[in-house]
Image: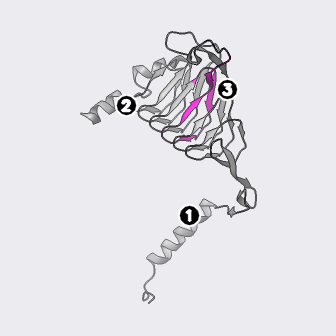
């Protein structure tokens, strides 16, 4: 029964629910059961993107309240959004192609204000600041991306990190608040703040070497080493 519900309850390009989105790419899927989804008319999901169970996708302040003209939540091609993530755009949130989010990631471009001490904080609307996450980045389990954050390309955000501000391309950030702990330096590798270096791995070369090793082992007929 669960498998049937998951199959027929998921949202794919050929379902009626997909037509409510600004764009719902070929091969994209929002799996069942979904979390809260509203403001679909301002949500774009790229090709071959997978959105897991209980993910909240929202644009605007609440259902029934008109959104700003330029408000949008844009998720690129081949992205993966882990279970129970929350992406809430009052203004604009954009994920580039091939961005992967671990489970329980929270991304919001707005927070409540607290300027008036006589008004409950929950009723004060703060400013919204756009969020951008560059192509190829990985956001670890339980990370929080705060308003006004720009994450570069191929960035790693460690699990549980709280990120605000600008994160340069090809870097690793961790902690609360998140700080850069490793950077990529061409011809050197991934260099930590202490100077430790993780060398560059050419995966194509490594794959070819493993293939050649496999061929050599397969053709080996001599005695095994003792």
Residue 32 % position (x, y): 37, 31
Q: Is residue 172 above or below residue 211?
A: above
The question of residue 98 being in magenta is answered with yes
- Please indicate whether residue 37 sits to the left or right of residue 89 in the image: left
Of mark 1 and mark 3, the one earlier in the sequence is 3
Between tags 1 and 3, which lies in front?
Answer: 3
The numbered disc on residue 32 is 2
Residue located at (43% from left, 86% from top): 224
Between tags 2 and 3, which lies in front?
Answer: 3
**Residue that badge 1 annotates:** 207
Number of residues whose C-alpha sits closer than 10 Å to that of mark 1, classed few (under 14), some (14–19) or many (20 or more) = few
Residue located at (61% from left, 43% from top): 137
Q: What is the CA distance from the residue labelled 1 to the residue labelled 3?
A: 40 Å
Considering the numbered disc 1 on the image, is that residue within a helix, a strand or a loop?
helix
Q: Quadrant of the C terminus?
A: bottom left
Q: Is residue 105 above or below residue 191?
A: above
Of mark 2 and mark 3, the one earlier in the sequence is 2
- Please indicate whether residue 93 sits to the left or right of residue 29 in the image: right
Q: Which of the 4 quarters of the picture holds residue 54?
A: top left
- Please indicate whether residue 201 sits to the left or right of residue 100 in the image: right
The question of residue 96 being in magenta is answered with yes
Q: Is residue 198 above or below residue 151?
A: below
Considering the numbered disc 2 on the image, is that residue within a helix, a strand or a loop?
loop
Q: Give, as a single range, the part of the protein colored magenta.
A: 89-115
**Residue that badge 3 annotates:** 130
Q: Residue furthest left?
A: 1
Residue 77 versus residue 57: which sits nearer the camera?
57
């Amino acid at each position: 029964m669960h498998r049937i519900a998951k199959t027929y309850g998921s949202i794919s390009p050929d379902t009626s629910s997909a037509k409510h989105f600004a764009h719902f790419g070929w091969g994209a899927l929002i799996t069942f059961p979904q979390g809260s989804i509203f403001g679909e008319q301002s949500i774009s999901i790229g090709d071959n993107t997978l959105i897991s169970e209980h993910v909240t996708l929202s644009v605007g302040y609440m259902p029934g309240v008109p959104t700003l003209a330029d408000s949008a939540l844009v998720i690129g091609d081949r992205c993966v959004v882990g279970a129970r993530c929350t992406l809430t755009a009052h203004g604009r949130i954009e994920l580039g192609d091939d961005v992967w989010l671990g489970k329980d990631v929270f991304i919001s471009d707005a927070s409540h204000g607290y300027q008036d001490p006589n008004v409950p904080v929950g009723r004060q609307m703060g400013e919204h600041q756009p969020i951008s996450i560059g192509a190829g980045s990985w956001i670890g389990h339980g990370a929080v991306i705060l308003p006004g954050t720009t994450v570069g390309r191929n960035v790693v955000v460690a699990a549980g990190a709280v990120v605000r501000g600008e994160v340069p391309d090809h870097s690793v950030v961790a902690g609360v608040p998140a700080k850069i702990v490793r950077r990529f330096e061409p011809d050197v590798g991934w260099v930590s703040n202490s100077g430790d270096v993780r060398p560059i791995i050419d995966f194509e070369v490594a794959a070819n070497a493993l293939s050649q090793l496999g061929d050599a082992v397969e053709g080996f007929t001599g005695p095994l080493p003792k």
